[in-house]
Amino acid sequence: MKVRVVGVAFLLIFVVLHAHAAEQKLQLPLGLQEEAAYRPEENPPTPEKIALGKQLFWDRRWSSSGTVACVSCHPPDHGWSDPAPFSTNFAGKPAPRHTPTIVNRLFSDRQLWTGLRSSLEEQALKDSNRTDEAVVQHLGAIPAYQEQFRKVFGADLNPQGVAKAIAAYVRTILSGNAPYDRFRAGETGALSPAALRGLVLFEGKARCVRCHTGFNFTDEGYHNIGVGMDKANPDLGRHTVTKIETDRGAFKTPTLRDVAKRGPYMHDGSENTLEGVVTFYNQGGHKNPGLSQEIQPLSLTVQEQTDLVAFLQALTGEIAPDVSRPPQLP
């Protein structure tokens, strides 16, 4: 009887510890807020799942062309965004829009410029350009992947598990502890005089904070700022998803964290530099019927534009080295 009681007690302790490990939260960098994190209940992160997701994120073998991985369009050394205006997608063809960064996606549910995908899981599952059968055929033939899947999910390799693992890894790509964050934490010398002037402009005359708000510098909303709306057949953005007239030409507000690392900018990659972006806003965007009321000429001087760029550069943070380091693939 005593042996049985001890055995049951041990089992209970194991279950509690296992559950605790499954729900363990990441240590967030300075400036980020845990209460704003989005983690689907059906996909709790574990170290093993994150490690598996990292391998899949870097593995080219599961794209339809066999030459493209997630990291191909989201390289760590370029702010996890593509240095080209238009990426090559998983099918080996040009993508219709510039690749947005995946930095700090822990704080967002809907993904892509138009919010087409409701989660990182859905994005990973539907944007690989692979059929479910092809994913299983190619990755399932790799014994080490099958072994990891059985350990993480208790099942053979499957497309839903692939998506969950990748999403779990992407949610660890976190940038914080930027000069701006250290300044807010009391380090008065963290920002240069130009960046300090730029901060005042950002929150005031330049009107940036009206959309790039909060600790992650995005309202997660969709706005028509006029990019590309001067073309004969402009990209209608969010309207392609919702079919709502007021969404014509509206695109999701990107985070500004690490923005200095990841030109070109805008959903069409039309601005090569931050200076060009600031000039675009200073001129009031491109006029069109759906232009957001927040977009209007700013009358910033040359010096003010330079100061604003200095502040944007002060949003460059730190990402844990082990997150960015390429994994060993099976």
Image (cartoon, rainbow, N blue to C red):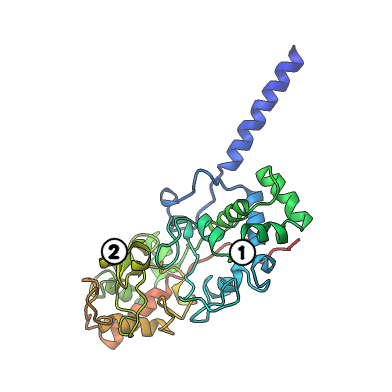
Residue at the spot 27% in from the left edge and 69% down from the top edge = 203
Of 324 and 220, the residue lying toward us: 220
Of 102 and 154, the residue lying toward us: 154
Quadrant hosting residue 214: bottom left
Residue type for callout 2: Ile
Q: Is residue 47 left or right of residue 261?
A: right
Q: Is mark 1 on a helix, strand or loop?
A: loop
Residue at the spot 38% in from the left edge and 64% down from the top edge = 241
Residue 191 picture location, percent across and down: 39, 72
Quadrant hosting residue 19: top right
Q: In which quarter of the image is the N terminus?
A: top right
Q: Is residue 234 left or right of residue 58?
A: left
Q: How far is mark 2 from mark 1, CA to CA?
A: 30 Å
Crowd band around label 2 with a 10 angstrom C-alpha radius: few (<14), some (14–19), many (20+): few
Residue at the spot 67% in from the left edge and 61% down from the top edge = 134
In the image, residue 15 sits, relative to residue 35, either above or below, namely above
Q: In which quarter of the image is the C terminus?
A: bottom right
Which of the labelled discs sits on residue 1, or is there none?
none
Which residue extends farthest top?
A: 1
In the image, residue 16 sits, relative to residue 150, either above or below, namely above
The residue identified by callout 1 is 130
The residue identified by callout 2 is 244
Quadrant hosting residue 320: bottom right
Which residue extends farthest right?
A: 143
Residue type for callout 1: Arg
Residue 11 picture location, percent across and down: 68, 27
Sooner in the amino-acid sequence: mark 2 or mark 1: 1
Q: What element carries label 2?
A: loop
Residue 246 picture location, percent across and down: 25, 67
Crowd band around label 1 with a 10 angstrom C-alpha radius: few (<14), some (14–19), many (20+): some
Q: Is residue 170 left or right of residue 178?
A: right
